[in-house]
Image (cartoon, rainbow, N blue to C red):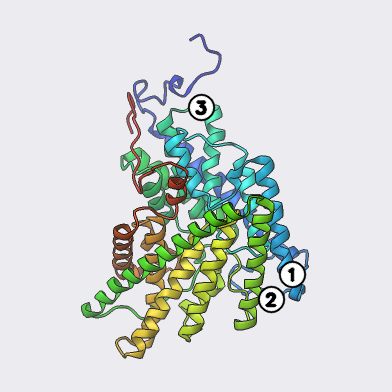
């Protein structure tokens, strides 16, 4: 062997054509490594968001997280919109000096890397993306933590590639491991994270691919559990379950409603992105204005409801909806509209953050509004509204992101409401099908199509000559 540096195929013990074990055990080890590193990164990211939030919005130096609680009133009062505005300027500074990949939802960039760059990503993204997102969310932006966590996990592959010089199909597979590990770490949802990775990045259902991806998601969840415990991010809603077959069609109708809401969400985000780029050519001015408007929406929301429901992933607000603490349909409709607009402004004007959590909030609001309408006509009992809100979450995620299988699994893992899987699946299947009939692109693939990348949804085939999985 003449080369000083051994390539991936030179590790004979692991290569499928040399040695008794093939490459499978190495994939499992790499999957576990990605899971552990992603979990550790998610913990640091968790406290970074909390620190920035407490300093920027509350004026206190504290790393205590208020993920499940409503944020106290900000001492900045009417000057609050200046906080997300300044945060937006910092994010654009990072994007202009270190690369635009720190902006957006994160998953679209991973999909682009898988399709057009043979799975290659910049190693710096593993550090810059969490920082940019922590600034966006911590200063009041409406976005989720999961997208950047997924991109962080995927970017770890770039560091591993520098060691192993992997072929393209293995880089892409390990991108999927990182994506699944990222969402598993944030949501403590290893099975949902695994499904999401297999659906969106590497739908290759061969044994070692399945095992190594699952090892990554389990590893990430176990690492975060060491610090935060075995938690459910959202409250359980299975005190009332569907007990009649006649009630199941109601969840099919909810899926169709979710599909319409998803199209509105995708369209709103796309319109804000396109028109802000056309009308405001200066990226600093564009994002500063977008985040200033988000700050105004925060003030409006607090004035009308008494809470900043729009900040970050709005997990406290989702909890209120699932527990039935918001019983007025007009308040729910207001929150739905404000969340949709605030998220579109945050991400569409150039911010950094995920759209998975905002989809959960919009879906829960949609399901609860639908439930209150059914209750008004005495079609369902009151205690079924929480279940409809949960299924609305699943349907909204499935239709907006294209995560047909992972959406219902994620919804029940987030709440521990495993008995709700059947109605959640019915809602998700219908929502996905209706949205696909009306709009072929998901919220992840539409931005790529606007840039001339005609990337299909949910499937990716890569040539793998001379390898086994």
Front residue of 444/181: it is 444
Tell me residue 145's x, y (percent): 56, 57
Residue 12 falls in which quadrant of the image? Answer: top left
Residue visible at 51% across and 51% down in the picture: 182
Pointer 1: what residue? 58
The residues bearing labels 3 and 1 have C-alpha atoms spaced at a distance of 46 Å
The answer to whether 421 appears left or right of 291 in the picture is left
What mark, if any, has residue 164 been given in the picture? 3
What mark, if any, has residue 72 been given in the picture? 2
Of labels 2 and 3, the one closer to you: 2
Report whether residue 436 is seen. yes
Front residue of 255/325: it is 255
Please tell me which of labels 2 and 1 falls first in the chain: 1
Residue visible at 42% across and 49% down in the picture: 445
Please tell me which of labels 3 and 1 falls first in the chain: 1
Secondary structure under tag 3 reads helix
The residues bearing labels 2 and 1 have C-alpha atoms spaced at a distance of 8 Å
Residue visible at 21% across and 80% down in the picture: 246
Secondary structure under tag 2 reads loop
Instruction: Give the class, few, some or many, for how many residues have Cα within 10 Å of label 2's Cα (few <14, many ≥20).
Output: few
């Amino acid at each position: 062997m003449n080369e000083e540096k051994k390539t991936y195929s030179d590790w004979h013990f692991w290569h499928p054509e040399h040695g008794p074990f093939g490459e499978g055990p190495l994939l499992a080890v790499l999957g576990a490594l990605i899971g552990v590193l992603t979990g550790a990164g998610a913990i640091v990211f968790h406290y970074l968001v909390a620190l920035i939030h407490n300093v920027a919005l509350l004026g206190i130096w504290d790393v205590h997280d208020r993920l499940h609680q409503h944020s106290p009133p900000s001492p900045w009062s009417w000057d609050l919109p200046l906080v997300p505005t300044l945060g937006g300027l910092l994010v654009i500074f990072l994007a202009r000096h270190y690369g635009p990949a720190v902006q957006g939802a994160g998953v679209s960039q991973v999909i682009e890397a898988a399709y057009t760059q043979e799975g290659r990503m910049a190693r710096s993204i593993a550090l810059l993306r969490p920082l940019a997102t922590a600034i966006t969310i911590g200063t009041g932006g409406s976005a989720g933590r999961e997208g950047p966590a997924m991109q962080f996990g995927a970017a770890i592959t770039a560091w591993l590639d520098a060691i192993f010089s992997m072929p393209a199909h293995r880089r892409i597979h390990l991108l999927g491991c990182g994506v699944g590990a990222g969402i598993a770490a944030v949501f403590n949802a290893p099975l949902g994270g695994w499904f999401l990775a297999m659906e969106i990045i590497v739908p290759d259902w061969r044994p070692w691919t399945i095992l190594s991806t699952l090892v990554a998601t389990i590893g990430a969840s176990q690492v975060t559990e060491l610090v935060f415990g075995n938690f459910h991010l959202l409250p359980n809603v299975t005190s009332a379950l569907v007990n009649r077959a006649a009630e199941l069609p109601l969840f099919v109708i909810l899926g169709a409603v979710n599909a319409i809401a998803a199209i509105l969400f995708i369209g709103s985000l796309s319109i804000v992105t396109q028109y802000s780029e056309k009308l405001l050519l200066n990226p600093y001015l564009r994002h500063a204005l977008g985040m200033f408007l988000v700050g105004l929406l925060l003030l409006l929301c607090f004035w009308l409801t008494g809470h900043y429901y729009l900040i970050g992933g709005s997990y406290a607000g989702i909890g209120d909806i699932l527990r039935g603490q918001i019983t007025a349909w007009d308040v729910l409709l207001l929150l739905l509209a404000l969340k949709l607009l605030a998220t579109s402004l945050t991400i569409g004007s150039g911010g950094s953050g995920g759209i998975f959590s905002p989809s959960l909030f919009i879906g829960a609001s949609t399901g609860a509004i639908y439930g209150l309408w059914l209750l008004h006509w005495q079609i369902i009992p009151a205690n079924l509204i929480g279940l409809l809100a949960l299924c609305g979450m699943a349907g909204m995620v499935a239709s907006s992101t294209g995560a047909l299988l992972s959406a219902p699994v994620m919804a029940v893992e987030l709440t521990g409401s495993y008995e709700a899987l059947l109605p959640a699946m019915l809602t998700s299947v219908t929502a996905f099908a209706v949205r696909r009939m009306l709009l072929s692109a998901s919220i992840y693939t539409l931005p790529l199509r606007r840039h001339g990348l005609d990337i299909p949804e949910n499937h990716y085939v890569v040539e793998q000559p001379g390898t086994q999985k």
